Image (cartoon, rainbow, N blue to C red):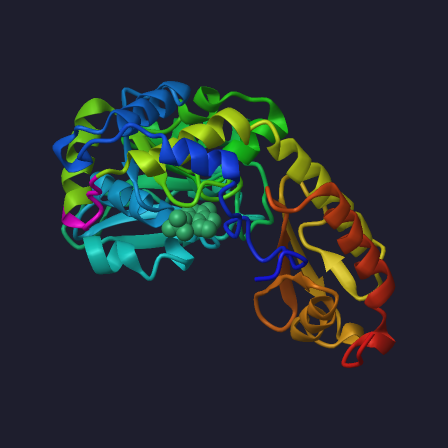
């Protein structure tokens, strides 16, 4: 893709910077399936420590990390509770059912956020006719919820309820880094309410690949076996872990820039008749918005923006998402805001502007 293109489709489209590539090239490596890779060890220890957990496991993707957690918490005939818009349920190809025989009971959240009160009565009694409720899965920040940060007091209340019912807690923290930077609340404060926490290095942090599952030592030992079963054992994975370590050193604090740039673009959306921010406030780097009929469809809007060198993600005819990330500069964010304000007029849809 040409460099002039401003790609807002996802925060996963970033390319490793020259400095990150240099760190990858210089990484000390070993065979990680033999548990011999020193760079992978460094990453696992560092992130487990950040999250206040005993151990961590480097895995190829956020999906694998979540699905290993599903297997740790539940098995065939068991059920997990989660909000209806979450990634585990919507975007992981039905893996809880397909790979683990696990049922997902979905609860309608508000922008992905559920209240402890909504969980009342959702833990099934022990009865031979019923699935066994095993754990609650939350997502922070919430992708389909518009990058919402899960309020910590709501997590604490859900944790209290879960423990009263002897249920586990899993966090899909693919973008936990954004929540940490947006609030100043440290990683371990969020993580302490969960048995298992998954984080990604390939979203806002700009690494090319990699996620990590953290939790108790004996759970992570089991997770290692499950990773092998799923084909996720990687050999000289230190080259990838080095990218993640580099990202933690150099790309974490700068997420604040992404959040500022997202708000700048959101302001232009707010000012544009026919576009509605949904949710109305942008808290992190994801901007979800709806398209009114006066601007045609989301596909028309995407086509107009594309003619100006800007790519967005469409999610149905009336909904779209734009993300800021490492490869969107301040000047590019300003350009996007300018194009939205000037090019997205009812007359422009379907015309070359
Ligand atoms: C909230 C959330 N969880 C998990 C994932 C899965 O990550 P991966 O694409 O690395 O499998 C994503 C991917 O975008 C995500 O947004």
Left or right placement of residue 118 versus residue 230 in this view: right
Locate residue 93: give its quadrant: bottom left
Residue 164 in the image: above or below residue 49: below
In the picture, the quarter occupied by the C terminus is bottom right
Q: Is residue 215 visible?
A: no
Please tell me which residue lies in front, 276 or 63. 63
- Above or below — where is 353 with respect to 327? below
- Identify whether 289 is placed above or below 329: below
- Residue 57 drawn at (x, y percent): 27, 32
Is 6 left or right of 353, judged from the image as shown?
Answer: left
**Number of numbered labels in the structure image:** 0
Residue found 31% across the figure and 42% down from its top? 65
Q: Out of 108 and 101, give the one closest to the viewer.
A: 101
- Look at 60% across and 49% down and name the residue there: 146
Image location of residue 5, percent across then percent down = 66, 59
Rendered view: 11 above or below 153: below
Q: Is residue 234 magenta?
A: yes
- Residue beneath the point at 19% across and 34% down: 32
Q: Which residues are magenta?
A: 229-235
Q: Main secondary structure of the magenta part?
A: loop
Residue 335 on image: x %, y %? 79, 53
Q: Which quarter shows the N terminus?
A: bottom right
Q: Quadrant of residue 47?
A: top left
Q: Is residue 76 magenta?
A: no
- Foreground residue, 260 or 84? 260
The residue sitting at 15% across, 34% down in the picture is: 222
């Amino acid at each position: 893709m040409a460099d002039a293109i401003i790609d807002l489709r996802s925060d996963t489209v970033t390319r490793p910077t020259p400095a990150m590539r240099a760190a990858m090239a210089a990484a000390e490596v070993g065979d990680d399936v033999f548990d011999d890779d020193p760079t992978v060890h460094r990453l696992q220890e560092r992130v487990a420590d950040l999250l206040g957990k005993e151990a961590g496991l480097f895995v190829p993707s956020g999906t694998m990390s979540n699905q290993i957690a599903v297997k740790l918490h539940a098995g065939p005939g068991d059920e997990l509770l989660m909000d209806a818009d979450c990634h585990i349920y919507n975007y992981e190809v039905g893996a809880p059912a397909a790979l683990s025989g696990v049922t997902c009971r979905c609860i309608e959240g508000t922008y992905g956020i559920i209240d402890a009160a909504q969980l009342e009565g959702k833990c099934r009694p022990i009865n031979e006719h019923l699935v066994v409720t095993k754990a609650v899965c939350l997502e922070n920040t919430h992708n389909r919820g518009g990058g919402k940060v899960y309020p910590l007091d709501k997590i604490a209340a859900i944790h209290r309820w879960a423990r009263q019912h002897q249920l586990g807690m899993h966090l899909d923290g693919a973008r936990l880094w954004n929540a940490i930077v947006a609030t100043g609340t440290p990683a371990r404060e969020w993580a302490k309410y969960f048995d298992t926490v998954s984080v990604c290095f390939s979203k806002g942090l700009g690494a090319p690949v990699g996620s990590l599952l953290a939790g108790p030592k004996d759970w992570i030992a089991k997770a290692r076996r499950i990773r092998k079963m799923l084909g996720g054992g990687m050999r000289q994975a230190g080259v990838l872990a080095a990218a993640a370590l580099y990202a933690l050193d150099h790309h974490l604090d700068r997420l604040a820039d992404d959040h500022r740039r997202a708000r700048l673009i959101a302001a232009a959306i707010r000012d544009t008749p026919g576009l509605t921010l949904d949710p109305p406030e942008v808290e992190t780097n994801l901007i979800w918005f709806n398209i009114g009929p006066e601007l045609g469809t989301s596909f028309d809007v995407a086509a107009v923006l594309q003619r100006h060198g800007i790519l967005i993600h469409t999610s149905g005819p009336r909904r779209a998402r734009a993300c800021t990330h490492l490869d969107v500069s301040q000047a590019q964010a300003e350009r996007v805001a300018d194009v939205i304000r000037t090019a997205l007029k009812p007359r422009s849809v379907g015309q070359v502007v």
